[in-house]
Image (spheres, rainbow, N blue to C red):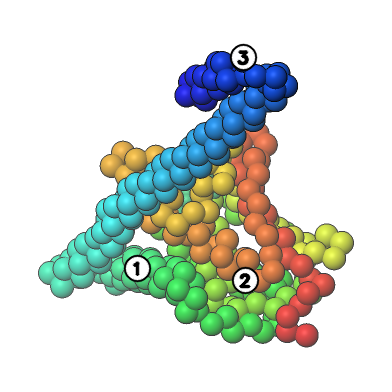
Amino acid sequence: MDLNKSLYTQKIEYLSLKNQNTSAPKIDEEALKKEMEKRWLMVLGEGAVFMIFLILGIVKTNKAFRAEISLTRQQKNFLLSITHEFKSPLSSIKLYLQTLQKRDLDKEKQSVFIKNAINDTERLNQLVENALLATQIENNNYTFRKENVSLSNFIKEILTINYNLLFNFEKKIDFQTHIESDIFYCIDKLAFSSVLINLMENAIKYSDEEVKLTVELKKVDKNILLRFIDEGMGISDHEKDKIFKKFYRSGDERTRRTKGTGLGLYIVSNVVEHHNGKILVKDNKPKGSIFEIWLDSEHNECE
Ligand code: ADP
């Protein structure tokens, strides 16, 4: 811009000197000024475009860098938590078996130990299923085998079977269901059961000693609404979006008290999406969370 200005003054000086002794028409200073301003705008425009691209580039690189760091941290957390998750049921199964082997326990004690060992095996199984399902969904390797089922019966069945697992949490549980009958939907039974189990397990995990969980299924106009309502610790507004991301767990792995891998809600939201559904998380009153699954019963894929 400085060069442009000095060029302009020199041009004026040169032309006025050249024109001094001639009868040529006077130089058009106005036109020269306009030309200088035009160049000035051009330089400014180019500079601005360059700056915009530079800033965009920096912002994008920074974002990608942060995402990479956060994913690495979450993956590290995942490894830490999955090792922990595997270790604790494994060591308790080992302990139950060793006690059964060494001690001559009465029949009643034996059956309690065996039941606990089976529950721990079931936990391990659930963990492996979750990891497998998450990997398959992510790689688009999972084939959804859908069939038209009575959602009402299916939910009752899965919740009842898995209710036994809840006793493992050693919490006082007030569990209620309000399931409207004769609601049908096209689902992949395996994937959908994982939605139900994950939401039920979370409601218990993230509640204090006294758990209150209500599961509702009803028709709302042309949609089907499935709700998991708990009175647990709730989810802050800034975490509501994050909890559905892979490996996301709130807090720090070393200080956290609850077990988990951060895969549960990632699977839940993916499976719901594959069923033409939407999942929302809301605050419950006075405390706790509500997970709502909206299914579009007008687009039943099985029909
Ligand atoms: P995990 O339970 O293995 O940590 P999830 O993907 O199931 O992984 O959940 C992600 C995070 O969302 C949890 O770490 C927890 O902080 C939060 N969360 C999930 N469900 C609930 C709930 N019902 N109440 C409060 N917080 C929850």
Q: Sequence order check: which comes first, mark 3 or mark 2?
A: 3
Give the residue type at disc 3.
Answer: Gln
Q: Secondary structure at mark 1?
A: helix
Q: Is the C terminus in the top left, top right, bottom left or bottom right quadrant?
A: bottom right
Kindly tell me whether residue 245 is visible in this rendering: yes
Evaluate if marks 1 and 3 touch, with contact meaning CB atoms under 8 Å apart: no
Give coordinates of residue 27: x percent, y percent.
68, 21
Q: Is residue 295 above or below residue 280?
A: below
Q: Residues within 10 Å of mark 2 (few under 14, many from 20)?
A: some
Q: Quadrant of residue 236?
A: top right
Tell me the CA gap for discs 1 and 3. Answer: 99 Å
Q: Which residue is mark 2?
A: 274
Give the residue type at disc 1.
Answer: Leu
Q: Secondary structure at mark 3?
A: helix
Q: Residue at x 57, y 20 (%)?
A: 18
Tell me the number on the disc at residue 20: 3
Give the residue type at disc 2.
Answer: His
Q: Is residue 172 above or below residue 96?
A: above
Tell me the number on the disc at residue 25: none
Q: Quadrant of residue 144?
A: bottom right
Q: Which residue is mark 1?
A: 124
Q: Residues within 10 Å of mark 3 (few under 14, many from 20)?
A: few
